[in-house]
Image (spheres, rainbow, N blue to C red):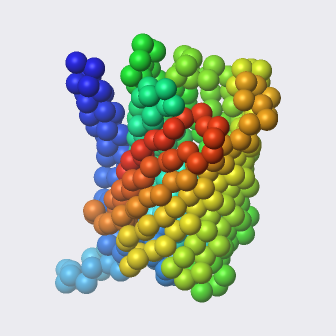
């Protein structure tokens, strides 16, 4: 019965995620040209411009009106915004997002992750959503992420429920695409808010400042993030932690990405003060693959494995589904 309940919940959450992006994808598809500008793995450094109007023969006197109408359509807010997105993508590397490490790029997509965690005592914890959601590039320097609360399922007698709502902002300080340096330097900042009940939610606001760096050499790239997990209150319960993540990726034809990550956490204050843990996360990512116009699809999977004697959990599997646009 419990397995059946989990299946129903996962199906419902996946359906909700698809429904959330469907209206936006329709509007974007309907108002953009056939030029493919969305692939994060495209090495071109030229931003895409508006498409040319059709050359279908027109009645006398209607050509200028049609041209004016086409120009007006290309200057609406959707096209202006998407041209900015294309320019941002053209001026930074085109690596894909790792499974655990925060993506060291500005990206625009809807992302839904799931994970299945096994604790040291054998208990299972399933997380549907994993703090991922809609990622938007509003201007040439910023990305804003808004993540709905994940749904968390326990194998023991702990109550299932929703976790905390979170937001995340990325600032691009310096970047260059392939052939011009292939690097990115950014300052990121995140926050989660206590909308879920413990233990599914933390019960406190948590702030996450982050320094993000990446460098590429041909098909190979490294992404590094250094961050702190700083509760605004409840430090004696939650503690503070400092996180160092490194991802190594290799692109094959721009569509297949084997990767491995090192994820280390150093605890300060709280019940784990003075301890540290490290995980290795091998993974494989496919995409992005075109669906329609700007809308693409990508999927990745991997497993995070504890390699230090102290660890807060043993391992967990990850599945990520992404829709860049």
Task: Please state which of residues 152 and 178 is positioned toward the viewer in this rendering.
Answer: 152
Quadrant holding the N terminus:
top left
> Residue 28: where, in percent of width, then height?
37, 57
Report the label total: 0
- Residue 231's place in the image compared with 45, above or below, is above
Q: Quadrant of the C terminus?
A: bottom left
* Picture quadrant where residue 69 is located: bottom left
Vertical relation: 199 (above or below) 58 = above
Q: Is residue 317 visible?
A: yes
Q: Which residue lies most toward the bottom here?
A: 179
Instruction: Please state if 209 lies on the left or on the right of 297 as rendered.
Output: right
Among the 4 quarters of the image, the one containing residue 323: bottom left
Name the one closer to the observer, 167 or 213.
213
In depth, the one of 85 and 108 nearer the eye is: 108
Position in image of residue 115 (x %, y %): 42, 40
Q: Residue at x 36, y 75 (%)?
A: 35
State which quadrant residue 299 falls in: bottom left
Decide if residue 129 is in sight here.
Answer: no
Residue at image position (59%, 81%) is 217
In percent of width and height, residue 236 lies at 77, 21
Residue at the limit of the structure toward the front, as seen here? 309
Relative to 270, residue 180 above or below: below
Q: Nearer the viewer, residue 270 or 162?
A: 270
Q: Going 26% across and 25% down the picture, which residue do you hit?
A: 3
Residue positioned 62% across, 27% down in the render: 193
Question: In this rendering, would 100 be left or right of 223?
Answer: left
Check the image and report above or below for 101 versus 161.
Answer: below
Can you give x and y, in whole percent of width and height, for residue 320 in the image?
40, 49
């Amino acid at each position: 019965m419990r397995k059946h309940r989990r299946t129903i919940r996962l199906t419902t959450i996946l359906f909700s995620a698809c429904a959330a992006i469907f209206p936006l994808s329709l509007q974007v598809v309907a108002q953009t040209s056939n030029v493919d500008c969305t692939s994060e793995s495209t090495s071109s450094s030229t931003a895409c411009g508006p498409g040319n109007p059709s050359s279908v023969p027109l009645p006398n006197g209607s050509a200028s009106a049609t041209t004016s109408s086409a120009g007006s359509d290309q200057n609406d807010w959707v096209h202006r915004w998407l041209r900015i997105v294309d320019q941002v993508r053209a001026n930074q590397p085109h690596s894909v997002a790792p499974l655990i490490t925060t993506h060291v790029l500005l990206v625009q997509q809807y992302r839904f992750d799931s994970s299945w965690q096994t604790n040291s005592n054998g208990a299972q914890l399933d997380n549907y959503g994993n703090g991922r959601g809609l990622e938007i590039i509003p201007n040439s320097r910023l990305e804003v992420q808004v993540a709905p609360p994940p749904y968390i399922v326990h194998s023991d007698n702990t109550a299932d429920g929703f976790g905390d709502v979170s937001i995340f902002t990325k600032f691009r300080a310096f970047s260059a695409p392939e052939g011009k340096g292939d690097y990115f330097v950014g300052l990121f900042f995140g926050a989660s808010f206590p909308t879920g009940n413990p233990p599914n939610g933390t019960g406190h606001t948590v702030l996450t400042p982050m320094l993000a760096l990446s460098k590429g050499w041909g098909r190979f790239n490294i992404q590094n993030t250094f961050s702190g997990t700083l509760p605004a209150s409840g430090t004696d319960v939650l503690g503070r932690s400092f996180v160092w993540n490194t991802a190594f990726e290799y692109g094959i034809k721009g569509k297949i990405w084997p990767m491995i990550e090192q994820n280390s956490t150093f605890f300060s204050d709280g019940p784990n003060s003075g301890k540290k843990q490290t995980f290795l996360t091998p993974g494989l990512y496919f995409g992005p693959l075109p669906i329609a116009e700007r809308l693409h699809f990508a999927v990745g999977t991997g497993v995070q494995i504890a390699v230090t004697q102290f660890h807060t959990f043993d391992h967990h599997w990850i599945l990520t589904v992404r829709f860049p646009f």
